[in-house]
Image (cartoon, grey):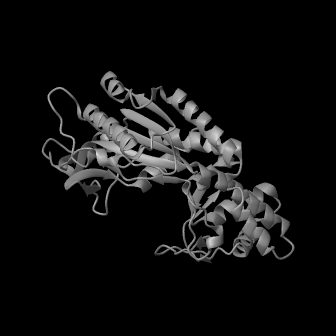
């Protein structure tokens, strides 16, 4: 039976615009008939990946780019520094062509001269740093002849690394190098209804004289504040299939939980300095299927005189979890809780064992490892 790690997060964010739409406005969504603040899953997945850089070694990480040729050139010349730039470019093109990846010439900007721009892949390609090194070695080894297509394909199929294993890879014209994601991430939604506000601002020219008090520029930024419900789940069976290494699999689960909890998308960060941490985190191991508890907030939370929205949201989350467990008989095998303040801790204490971040991550890693050992 497939095992999932469900991660539920309640996080209060002050005035902010961390994820904008095409007009620059904070993203929103309708849920339960009310407008909610929304942060896309893509935004938080990227923030999670960026946070990996704090502690994961490069060999276990990856890169998503159309400029893979530049990465290959760097690795090729690191393997053999006698290879000149021009030859390295051709070797990089050859090995990627053998792997079946299509490229097209980079567009030159207006007025730009020269022919030194590197070709771009036709789509964003997500590869592990280990796969880049594998391809570079193959390119150098095939320097004097044709590169074996089977070997090139294998070089991009093996050694997925933590990031590709977690988030997957989709190449529309070559399903053989696709990787099913081990992680699903929901769009974050506010637990309550929101209304946008507007900041009318001016920037004063430092060289203005007393007789010229006019602003150098004026503008308007839309923002909101919210308590967000965030949810993600890790499919441990899929993670095992993607990595095939117990140590790497348990580190991948540990890394995702830690970085998903503490990361924050960076939209308008300099303007709003909205870098909060979650009020509460509930992590549960479930067999059979994951369970998103967003239904707790279909009716928007409304503050009262005694309790904050974060505390009321925690109550809703705890109640929903209990109702699901009792109604469907699908209680988690393990449940752990992180709660910052006493009122939230008291509310969620019945949901699972209360721990700090490091002990929580360690406990889940230990349970995940035990599950992964049985899968292996």
Q: Position of residue 218 (x, y in %)?
A: 20, 52
104 sits left or right of 207 in the view = right
Q: Where is residue 190 in the image (x, y as percent from the top left)?
A: 28, 46
**Of 211 and 267, which appears nearest the observer?**
267
Is residue 320 visible in the rendered image? The answer is yes
Q: In which quarter of the image is residue 351?
A: top left
**Of 105 and 49, which appears nearest the observer?**
49
Vertical placement of 95 versus 18: above or below? below
**Of 85 and 249, which appears nearest the observer?**
249
Identify the residue at image location x=69%, y=42%.
373
Q: How many labels does the image show?
A: 0
- Which residue appears farthest toward the right when viewing the image? 144
Identify the residue at image location x=48%, y=54%.
184
Q: Where is residue 364 in the image (x, y as percent from the top left)?
A: 55, 35
Vertical placement of 151 versus 326: above or below? below
289 sits left or right of 317 in the view = right
Identify the residue at image location x=74%, y=63%.
155
114 sits left or right of 20 in the view = right
**Of 90 and 266, which appears nearest the observer?**
266
Q: Where is residue 101 in the image (x, y as percent from the top left)?
A: 65, 73
Is residue 206 visible in the rendered image? The answer is no
- Which residue appears farthest toward the left when viewing the image? 211
């Amino acid at each position: 039976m497939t095992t999932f790690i469900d991660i539920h997060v309640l996080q209060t964010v002050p005035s902010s615009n961390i994820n904008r739409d095409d007009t620059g406005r904070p993203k929103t969504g309708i849920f339960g008939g009310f407008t909610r603040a929304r942060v896309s899953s893509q935004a938080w997945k990227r923030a999670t990946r960026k946070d990996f850089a704090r502690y994961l070694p490069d060999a276990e990480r990856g890169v998503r780019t159309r400029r893979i040729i530049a990465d290959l050139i760097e690795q090729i010349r690191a393997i053999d520094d006698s290879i000149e730039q021009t030859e390295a470019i051709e070797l990089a093109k050859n090995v990627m062509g053998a792997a079946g990846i299509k490229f097209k010439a980079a567009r030159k900007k207006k007025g730009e001269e020269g022919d030194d721009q590197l070709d771009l892949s036709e789509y964003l390609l997500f590869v592990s740093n280990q796969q880049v090194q594998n391809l570079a070695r193959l390119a150098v080894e095939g320097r004097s002849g044709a590169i074996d297509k089977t070997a090139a394909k294998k070089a991009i199929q093996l050694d997925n690394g933590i990031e590709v294993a977690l988030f997957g890879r989709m190449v529309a014209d070559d399903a053989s190098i696709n990787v099913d994601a081990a992680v699903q991430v929901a769009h974050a939604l506010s637990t309550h209804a929101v209304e946008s506000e507007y900041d009318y601002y001016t920037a004063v020219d430092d060289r203005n004289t007393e007789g010229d008090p006019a602003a150098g520029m004026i503008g308007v930024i839309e923002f909101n504040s919210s308590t967000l419900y965030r949810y993600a789940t890790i499919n441990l069976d899929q993670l095992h299939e993607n990595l095939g290494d117990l140590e790497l699999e348990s580190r991948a689960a540990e890394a995702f939980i830690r970085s998903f909890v503490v990361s924050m998308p960076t939209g308008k960060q300099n303007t709003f300095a909205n870098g909060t941490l979650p009020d509460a985190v509930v992590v549960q191991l479930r067999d059979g299927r994951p369970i998103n508890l967003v239904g707790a907030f279909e009716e928007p939370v409304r503050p009262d005189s005694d309790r904050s929205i974060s505390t009321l949201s925690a109550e809703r989350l705890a109640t929903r979890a209990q109702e699901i467990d009792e109604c469907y008989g699908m209680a988690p095998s393990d449940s752990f809780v992180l709660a910052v303040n006493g009122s939230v801790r008291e509310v969620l204490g019945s949901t699972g064992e209360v721990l700090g971040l490091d002990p929580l991550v360690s406990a889940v890693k230990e349970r995940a490892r035990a599950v992964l050992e049985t899968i292996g």
